[in-house]
Every structure is written in structure tokens, then in C-alpha cells.
Amino acid sequence: MAHIKVFYEPETELLTIFWKAPRQDQICTELGDGVILTKDPRSGEPIGLEVLSYRPDDARFDALSVELGR
């Protein structure tokens, strides 16, 4: 079973989601609209997301589709 870690910092409106362990030398790429993809530096595999200026009623998640491998 996949473990997902979700961190929300209301003071800075930052939402961070990791489905793999964070890396010290991870690579971050802005995808647009304040969404940042975090990747493993060796494999390039996505390991997390950060959402800037996030609020609980954020419309950016209206069309979210998630698939988790086993």
C-alpha cells in the first residue's frame, strides 16, 4: 500500500504532497499555475508536488485524477 504524506502550512498557503520519500538533492520543476513537481534526481521519477497559494477550496483540484501503482 502506498503511503502519502500531506503537509499544509496555512500561514504560507503551501500544500506539499509526497508519495515517495523526499530526497536531499531533489529536483523541482514548476508545471504552471503555482504547481511544482518534485522528482528524484537520479531516476527522474516524480516523488511529490507542491501547490503554492493553496486554500482548502482551491479550484485547481477540481479536475484532479490520481492513479497509484501497486
Image (cartoon, rainbow, N blue to C red):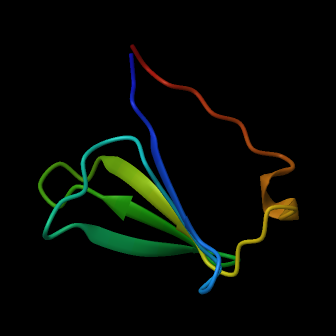
Residue lying at the far bottom in this picture: please name it.
Answer: 12
Is 56 placed left or right of 37 in the picture? right
| Quarter placement of the C terminus | top left
Q: Position of residue 50 (x, y in %)?
A: 51, 67
Which quadrant would the N terminus be assigned to in this image? top left
In the rendering, at what x and y percent does residue 34 appear?
Answer: 64, 78
> Which one is in front, 52 or 43?
52
Which quadrant holds residue 56? bottom right
- Relative placement, left or right, of 31 versus 26 is right
Number of disc labels = 0
Viewer-closest of 34 and 42: 34
Residue sticking out furthest to the front: 11
Coordinates of residue 54 in the picture (x, y in percent) = 71, 72
At 43% across and 20% down in the image, what residue appears? 69
| Residue at the image point whose x is 13% and y is 68% from the top | 24
> In the figure, is residue 13 to the left or right of 20?
right
Q: Position of residue 14 (x, y in %)?
A: 58, 75
Query: Horizontal placement of 22 versus 4: left or right?
Result: left
* 67 is higher (above) or lower (below) than 33: above
Q: At 31% across and 58% down in the image, what residue appears?
A: 39
